[in-house]
Amino acid sequence: MQRIAVFPGSFDPITRGHESVIKRALPLFDQLIVAIGENGEKKTFFPLERRLGWLKQVFGNDPRIRISTYSGLTIDFCRREKATFILRGLRTSADFEFERGIGQMNKMMYPEVETVFFLCAQEYASVSSSIVRDILRHGGDVRQFVPEGILI
């Protein structure tokens, strides 16, 4: 049985922290689906097509990584994709508390799934998409916070 994991997120924008978690977790899985969850109630800063383009630019050359989008519950997407792992990155203890609750609910809805937590690399612990967006709104340079080659 293939070990398929889903790394869900809005990637608005993708950060070096996201990139680090994906690259470090990849050896654990046969396939990793990096999936942009579409939430009609959440206003995004960048359009979906741009975020997809960035993910393809960063990970498109690795045959073990597939880029996708979905709407609805992440757990339903996992079921459709026959994924039995959800990958989540943790920057803070608050992230853990939030993600733990979601992971427990997901397990109740789809017992075959396991949530795998990866600690963020220390150098990226303070980097979040929301902070990157705030820097952008104020005209700052975000190149050190996003993967190499991403033009924002």
Image (cartoon, grey):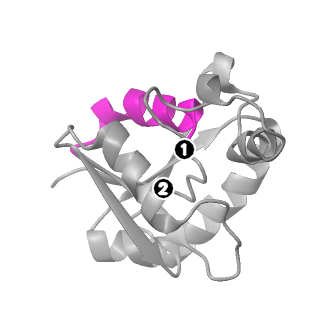
Any part of residue 119 in sight = no
The percent position of residue 10, horizontal first and vertical second, equals: 57, 59
Q: Residue at (67%, 31%) from the top-left corner?
A: 142
Q: Is residue 131 above or below residue 8?
A: above
Instruction: Answer left or right for 98 relative to 143.
Output: right
Q: Are marks 2 and 1 in contact (CB under 8 Å)?
A: yes
Query: Quadrant of the image for the N terminus?
Result: bottom left
- The quarter holding residue 149 reads top left
Disc 1 marks a residue whose amino acid type is Ile
Query: Which type of secondary structure does the marked residue at label 1 adopt?
Result: loop
Q: Residue at (47%, 62%) from the top-left corner?
A: 36
Disc 2 marks a residue whose amino acid type is Arg
| Crowding at mark 1 (Cα within 10 Å: few <14, some 14-19, many 20+) | many
Q: Residue at (35%, 74%) from the top-left corner?
A: 79
Magenta-highlighted residues: 14-30
| Crowding at mark 2 (Cα within 10 Å: few <14, some 14-19, many 20+) | some
Q: Earlier in the sequence, mark 2 or mark 1?
A: 1
Instruction: Answer left or right for 97 relative to 77.
Output: right
Residue under numbered circle 1: 14
Residue under numbered circle 2: 51
CA–CA distance in space, label 2 to label 1: 7 Å
Q: Is residue 10 above or below residue 88?
A: below
The percent position of residue 50, horizontal first and vertical second, equals: 46, 57
Choose between 112 and 141: the one closer to the eye. 141
The dominant secondary structure in magenta is helix
